[in-house]
Image: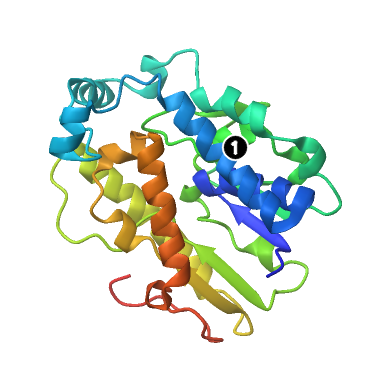
Amino acid sequence: MQVGRVCGVSSGAIIGTMLTQGWARNGRDGAREEIQRLWKRVAHAHTLSPLQNAPLERWLWGWDLSNSMMWRGMEMAMRMFSPAQLNPFGHNPLTHLLADLIDRTWLTHPNAPRLTVSATDVETGEAVLFGNAEIDADVLCASACLPFVFPAVRIGNRAYWDGGYSGNPPLGPLLYPAPPDELILIRAQAAHRPGVPSTPMEITNRLNEIACQNVLTAELAALPTSVRMTSYDADEALLDLPISSKFNGEADFLSELFEAGRHAATDPVMRGGADRPVRTTPRRGL
């Protein structure tokens, strides 16, 4: 498989950046090494986080952090105060981590796939696209800025939120100047979630999933009929994980997610409507 164009938002933007610079350096092996380096750094940084279960708690509740006092306190604070009030200086732990990982020499190398990262302009609500030469730690933090967790990220005189609200991801850059023969879509959130959320955090999480999913559905409906799409779904891997797991960066947990992703890539049953050269259209209940 050859990678010609990459587009991503939020965590997909960060992984896409590592893939792009790794591919330019040493093809698929380089891409794997760069993505692995990212998750090792995340796991290392998380060792200092107070938001993690002790061995007994992990035995009792697995990867669910919602029983810890730290999680309950953070959840209550997020209900009462905005991210700007809790974090007036806009500190984002990802900024320094990503600044150390991004290699602009390889990211802008002639061998690098064309990369597009999207963020949502807070004032206009429109998707703003950034190319290889423009992508840095601030752009990636803007693309991954959940408004209920982080203050808006400012780049120049504009403020940005998570790119998933305006394009999840925007597929237009992948179709220009000519549509590809094949498009591979890797989903990072569950499309279907049975049951009705009851807690404020669960409701907010589901609203985010629905908003981002509907944006993607509209994009897929406009795909040219000539494009063969392969979609790797995340429902099986993520449905049983609690919301608190989104704040979990432990190495063992990340390894489990990695193995779930490998399974999704090798199991034809988990390819959501893949390998069909037909137009993707919205389906009832999607």
Q: Residue at x 38, y 23 (%)?
A: 83
Residue position marked by numbered label 1 in the rendering: 140
286 vs 68, left or right, is right
Question: Residue 254: horizontal and vertical position, in percent?
Answer: 41, 43
Helix, strand or loop at disc 1?
A: helix
Specify the amino acid type for callout 1: Leu
- Is 189 rendered above or below residue 263? above
55 vs 37, left or right, is left
206 vs 67, left or right, is right
Question: Residue 92: horizontal and vertical position, in percent?
Answer: 50, 23
Of the 4 image quadrants, the one containing the N terminus is bottom right
72 vs 135, left or right, is left
Residue 66 shows up from this direction? no
Q: Residue at x 45, y 32 (%)?
A: 43
Figure quadrant of residue 251: top left
Q: Which of the pair 278/272 is nearer the observer?
A: 272
Question: Residue 268: horizontal and vertical position, in percent?
Answer: 43, 77
Q: Which of the pair 130/100 is nearer the observer?
A: 100
Of the 4 image quadrants, the one containing the C terminus is bottom left
View extreme (right): residue: 110
- Is 234 rendered above or below residue 276? above
Q: Residue at x 43, y 79 (%)?
A: 273
